[in-house]
Amino acid sequence: MSDLESVLASWLRTHGVATAWATWDDGRRALAAAGFAAEMLGAGATEKRDVVLVEVAPGDDEAELTRLAGLATKALVAVTPNTRRVLGLPGARTVIPLLWRIGRVRERATLGDGGFALGLLPSAVRARLSPGEAFFVDVSPRTPQARRKLLRTVP
C-alpha cells in the first residue's frame, strides 16, 4: 500500500466518508486500493460526494478548486508538491493559503517513497525531503445557519 493509499484509508474512515470523486486516474486507483468506491469526476459533474480528491499544483486556478470543493459535502483532499521542501517547486508554499480559503485544513501528511534510508531519518528531516504532501480540507458548513443555507441551495 502506498503512502497516499494508507493516508486516504485512515482519514476517510476517521471522518466517516462513504462516497468520493477523483480528478485523476491515479487518485481513483488510490481510493479503490484504500477500500473506497470512487468515480472519475467528469467535466460537467454537479452531483455531490462526501470527498473530492484533487491534485493541486502551484498556480492552479482558485476558482476551479473552489468549484471542486463545492462538489464535496465533507472534505476536499488535496495532493500537492511538498510545501516544506528545501529545494521544492517555486510557489509551492502558495498552495496552503489557497486551501485555507477553501475550508479548514484538518489533516496534513507527508507523501513519497524515499525508501528505507528516508525512513531512518528524523520526521522533521523526512518532511523536508519527501516529494509530496496531502491535505484534508474540511468544507462542511461551520454553523447551523450555514447548514440551513446549504440545504436551501441544494437542488
Image (cartoon, helix red, strand yellow):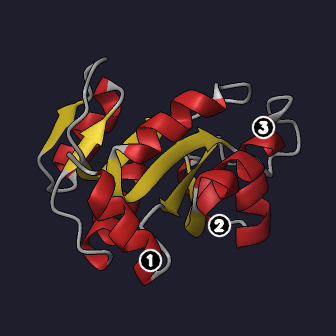
- The quadrant in which residue 43 appears is top left
Cα gap from disc 3 to disc 2, whole angstroms:
26 Å
The x and y percentages for residue 90 are: 86, 29
**Helix or strand or loop: what does disc 2 sit on?**
loop
Q: Which mark is residue 27?
A: none
Q: Is residue 140 left or right of residue 56?
A: left
Q: Give the residue furthest to the bottom.
A: 144
Q: Which residue is mark 3?
A: 92
Q: Which residue is mark 1?
A: 145
**Helix or strand or loop: what does disc 3 sit on?**
helix
Which residue is painted at 65% across and 26% down in the image? Answer: 60
**Helix or strand or loop: what does disc 1 sit on?**
helix
Q: Which residue is mark 2?
A: 120
Q: Give the residue furthest to the top.
A: 43
Assess disc 3: are there few (<14), some (14-19) or many (≥20) residues with their C-alpha within 10 Å of its C-alpha. Answer: some
Frontmost residue, 113 versus 83 = 83
Q: What kind of residue is marked 2?
A: Leu
The x and y percentages for residue 146 are: 45, 70
Frontmost residue, 43 versus 23 = 43
Frontmost residue, 85 versus 37 = 37
